[in-house]
Image (cartoon, rainbow, N blue to C red):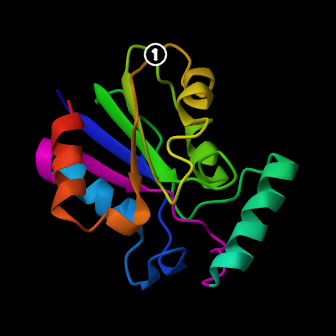
Amino acid sequence: MKSLVIYFSRPGNNYAVGYVEKGNTEVVAEYIREFTGADLFKCDPLRPYSEDYMTCTEEAMAYQRQNARPALKTYLDDISSYDVIYIGGPIYWGELPYEVYTELDRLDFKGKIVLPFATHEGSGIANVERVLKAKCSGATVRKGLAIQGSSVRSEFAKKQVKNWVV
C-alpha cells in the first residue's frame, strides 16, 4: 500500500521541550516514513507562527476563532495514488493547526485509510479523530496515535510509531 503523511510541525520554542530546530511532529512524520516508505507533505504556512510558544498559541487560538484557512507555500493537488494517509500535527486548543485543514479541505479522501497522529504535552489526541472523520468524507479513519512532545525523540516513542503504522 502506498502511503502519504500530511502534517504540520513548528520549530522554535516548544512547551516542555525548549528550542528545537525540527518540530516534534516532523520527527514523528519521519519515523512514519522510515517504517512505511511514505511520502511526506508538510503544511508549511506562508506566514509562519511566532517562534515564541505563548505567542504561537495565541495565534492558533485566533485561527480557531475565525475558522481560518491560512495560506500555505505549496499545496497537494491529488492524493488518488495513495491508499493510506497519515495526518498529524501538534495539538493547539484541542485540534490540529488550521494549516492542516487548509490542505484537507482541498482533497478527496474517498476510499482512503486515514490514521491521525498528534504531538502534545497533556491533551492526548484531543478531538482529532472526530474532526478528521468529518473532514475526510468517504475515508476510514482509524484509531490515532498521540505522543507526548517531550518524549518524541526517545526510542520508546519511535517504537510506539513502529507498532502503530499500517
Q: What residue is shown at x 72% (from left), y 50% (from top)?
A: 69
Residue behind mark 1: 110
Which stretch did the figure color magenta? Answer: 34-51
Residue 141, percent from left and from top = 44, 21
Q: What residue is shown at x 47% (from left), y 23% (from top)?
A: 109
Vertical placement of residue 47 versus 158, above or below: below
Q: Quadrant of residue 82?
A: top left
Residue 40 painted magenta: yes
Badge count: 1
Q: In the image shown, does 93 or 50 lie closer to the viewer?
A: 93
Residue 166, percent from left and from top = 20, 30
Q: What residue is shown at x 62% (from left), y 22% (from top)?
A: 134
Q: Is residue 121 left or right of residue 62?
A: left
Vertical placement of residue 85 versus 18, above or below: above
Q: Quadrant of the N terminus?
A: top left
Q: Quadrant of residue 84?
A: top left
Name the residue type under label 1: Lys
Residue 69 painted magenta: no
Residue 3, percent from left and from top = 25, 36
- Considering every residue shown, the one lying at the far right of the view is 66
- Considering every residue shown, the one lying at the far front of the view is 122
